[in-house]
Image (cartoon, helix red, strand yellow):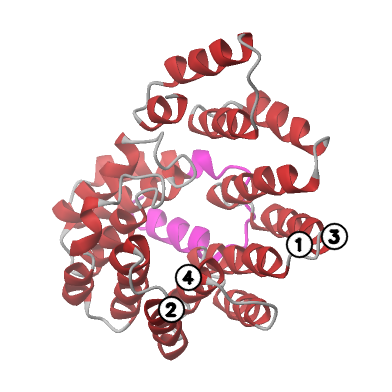
Amino acid sequence: MAFAYMQLGRFDEAKAALTQAESRGMSSVAFHMIRYMIACAQNDDAGLKKEADWARGQAPEIEMLMVQLEIARAAGHGQIRKARELTNRGVDLAQGRQLSEATAAFITTQAALEAKAGSYSQARDQAMKALKIAHGKHVEYYAALAFARAGESTEATSLASDIAKHFPLDTFENKVHIPVVLALVEIHRGNPGRAIELLQPSSDYEFGEEQFLVPAEVRGEAYLQMHNGKSAGEEFQKILDHRGVAPFDFPLAKLGSARAYLLLGDNLKAKAAYNDFFSFWKDADPDIPILKQAKAEYAKLQ
């Protein structure tokens, strides 16, 4: 119930449900993970620290779950160096339990985040490193995301085919994960219309906890490439309107929204959206490619 309330953006009710459960003697790492995601959605730094500190005193398997959220939050706010440090922490915890697939999963997740930030060489290196350690659908999916964004189409499509081969009845893999990877490949090839077609099966699932609106984000990128500001804006607005579904992707959705306004010729709203993005990324690493690009775009508006 708390998770459902969070995804609906009803954060006070979500927290109340957790408090009620705890008053009855219930406890779960999921309670802390939900609180962490809500704190991210509400820009509550104290809440983020409280949940992260709690996890540090728990068993490695529990701490690993929280570290995954910390990585997503750091990268979502442009703190890639911090995300790398957290990834190293996750790798150490996984290796300490001799969990090869979990080790590779931490590395490929970081690879996908590097690619999203525009650091393509690091993304490729991390993805290849992870695949030498282990495979599995999570590892292969995030490696494929990294390769697709980095322009390594052959590697991305090969991994997507391997996932389809080994998981032919897996709904999320075949209707969301694989279409997302192939859509990113088509965007890189300059075929945004094909990308949108590939993402059509994903629309029934993109608001769910498995996807966190990733298909909407990729669809928005495709529409930007088509110079369709209206449709691009609608896709990014899904993320902005459902912060409880995608708490870590809110800042980059602001950037996508700014670019959509530019295409529509609404420079005032574009400026406001860029400023919102820069505010979220005030502590970001200054050398991130996507941040440099955003600053260059904003400078042209002055």
| Nearer the camera: disc 3 or disc 4 | 3
Q: CA distance from mark 3 to mark 4?
A: 24 Å
Asked which quadrant contains residue 35, the reply is top right
Determine whether, in the image, residue 93 is placed left or right of residue 152: right
The picture quadrant where one finds residue 7 is: top left
User: Residue 154's x, y, as percent?
Assistant: 42, 91
Residue at the image point whose x is 30% and y is 51% from the top:
206
Give the alpha-carbon distance from disc 4 to disc 1, as whole Å. Answer: 18 Å
Residue beneath the point at 62% across and 82% down: 128
Q: Are marks 4 and 1 in contact (CB under 8 Å)?
A: no
The amino acid type, in three-letter code, at marker 4 is Tyr
Which of disc 1 and disc 3 is earlier in sequence?
A: 1
Q: Is residue 268 left or right of residue 35?
A: left
- Return the mark for residue 91: 1
Q: Which mark is residue 96?
A: 3
Quadrant of the snapshot with the N terminus: top left
Check the image and report above or below for 114 versus 37: below
Kindly report which numbered mark, 4 or 2, lies closer to the viewer in this rendering. 2
Q: Position of residue 159 (x, y in %)?
A: 45, 82
Q: Which residue bears the numbered disc 4? A: 141
Say whether disc 1 or disc 2 marks the residue closer to the N-terminus.
1
Mark 3 surroundings: few (<14), some (14-19) or many (≥20) residues within 10 A: few
Q: Is residue 116 magenta?
A: no
Q: Secondary structure at mark 2?
A: helix
Which residue bears the numbered disc 2? 166
